[in-house]
Image (spheres, grey):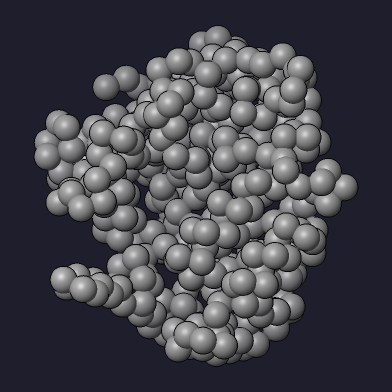
């Protein structure tokens, strides 16, 4: 297979973890006879510094042409003024909207080697295997905003079509997994949530009768996600609730550095990124955890390129690296040895057992 992959390193540790993911993708290409061509472009704070805009036109045009997009992270103290005209996060929101990437998939499956890194008791984490599907291009983040001298407002709005399409993605995932879907809302207070609940009920009833649907209020879901995470299979929710719940869910795995994500639309092209931030405090030190970025590359192989065996091989290699104790500082328990970014990446590539020759077309 030939594929064009746009790499958006971004800010902070973004360039370090995307480099690790690209190295793994090159190794996959070598083993399986694929040709992956990588194109690097700016986004976020780095793009602001270079062009004055968080999503330059050249970056968006390259992303539109790509088979898949691999993103590092955006943001940092240099650009942290919330009142600034342009901010790094605007680039991320804009590329999701422009490419129609409305469904964000975030799998959470704690690895036995990292259970001790989680603040949640290990016995609650054994057997946890869930996916959160977050609606990504609607809701309060994209609604009309107003600021007055003594007040401010943000409009939360959802259409029936927006809810239908993301629920279909989530229900399809549930059908392929264990057949259980939990829809999260705040229907006892919010009109948008009452619409969400009505639409989710209808879509699952009419189109996925083999999927078991339950509804949870977001506040109770925040509690249940920690108290009984094994009870959940696929969770679907709106944009802001999903943003919050997925960060909470990351603690089940022990670290943000272990969790990948895929942002998908109606086509095959998608955007893949670790859910962690730019971690400017450790940027440039070579100690960032690359596993989430590498697992995001595995999702890229599966969802955009249709290379399911290769995706599984990468996931198995990450698991093997963790089994072998190749733990970065964020996931190692007290007294355990730690490895740097490069060593963790090499451990994954070694576990792939690939030849050294790489099939790659260079820019």
User: In the image, is residue 244 above or below residue 327?
Assistant: below
| Quadrant the C terminus occupies | top left
Whether residue 155 can be seen here: yes
User: Horizontally, is 296 left or right of 151 in the view?
Assistant: right
> Who's the residue at 30% across and 60% down the image?
97
The residue lying toward the viewer, choosing from 32 and 154, is 154
Question: Which residue is drawn at the image coordinates 54% and 27% (left, top)?
Answer: 290
Residue 265 or residue 184, whichever sits in front: 184
Hey, which residue is sitting farthest top in the picture? 356
| Residue at (78% x, 25% y) in the render | 323
Which is more toward the observer, 188 or 24? Answer: 188
- x, y percentage for residue 81? 24, 45
The image position of residue 100, as x and y in percent, is 34, 62
Q: Is residue 163 above or below residue 222?
A: below
- In percent of width and height, residue 29 lies at 51, 25
Task: Indicate whether 296 appears above or below 217.
Answer: above
């Amino acid at each position: 297979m030939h594929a064009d992959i746009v790499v958006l390193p971004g800010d902070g540790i973004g360039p370090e973890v995307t480099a690790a993911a690209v190295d793994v993708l090159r190794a996959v290409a070598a083993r399986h006879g694929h040709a992956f061509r990588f194109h690097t472009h700016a986004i976020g704070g780095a793009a602001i510094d270079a062009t004055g805009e968080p999503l330059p036109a050249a970056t968006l045009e390259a992303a539109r042409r790509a088979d898949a997009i691999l993103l590092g992270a955006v943001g940092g103290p240099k650009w942290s003024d919330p009142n600034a005209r342009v901010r790094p996060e605007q680039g991320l929101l804009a590329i999701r909207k422009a490419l129609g990437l409305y469904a964000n998939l975030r799998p959470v499956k704690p690895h036995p080697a990292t259970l001790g890194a989680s603040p949640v008791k290990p016995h609650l984490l054994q057997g946890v295997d869930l996916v959160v599907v977050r609606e990504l291009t609607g809701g309060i983040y994209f609604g009309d905003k107003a600021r007055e001298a003594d007040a401010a407002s943000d409009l939360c709005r959802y259409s029936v079509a927006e809810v239908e399409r993301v629920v279909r993605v989530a229900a399809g995932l549930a059908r392929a997994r264990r057949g259980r879907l939990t829809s999260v809302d705040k229907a006892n207070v919010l009109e948008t949530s009452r619409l969400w609940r009505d639409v989710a009920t209808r879509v699952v009833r009419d189109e996925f009768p083999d999927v078991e649907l339950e509804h949870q209020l977001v506040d109770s879901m925040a509690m249940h996600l920690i108290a009984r995470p094994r009870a959940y299979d696929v969770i679907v929710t709106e944009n802001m609730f999903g943003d919050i719940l997925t960060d909470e869910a990351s603690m089940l795995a022990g670290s943000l550095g272990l969790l990948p994500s895929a942002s998908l639309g109606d086509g095959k092209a998608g955007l893949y990124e670790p859910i962690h931030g730019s971690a400017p405090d450790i940027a440039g030190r070579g100690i960032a955890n690359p596993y989430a970025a590498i697992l995001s590359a595995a999702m890229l192989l599966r969802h955009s390129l249709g290379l399911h065996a290769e995706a599984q091989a990468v996931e198995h290699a990450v698991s093997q690296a963790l089994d072998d104790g190749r733990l970065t500082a964020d996931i190692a328990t007290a007294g355990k040895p730690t490895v740097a970014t490069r060593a963790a990446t090499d451990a994954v590539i070694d576990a792939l057992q690939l030849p050294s020759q790489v099939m790659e077309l260079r820019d």
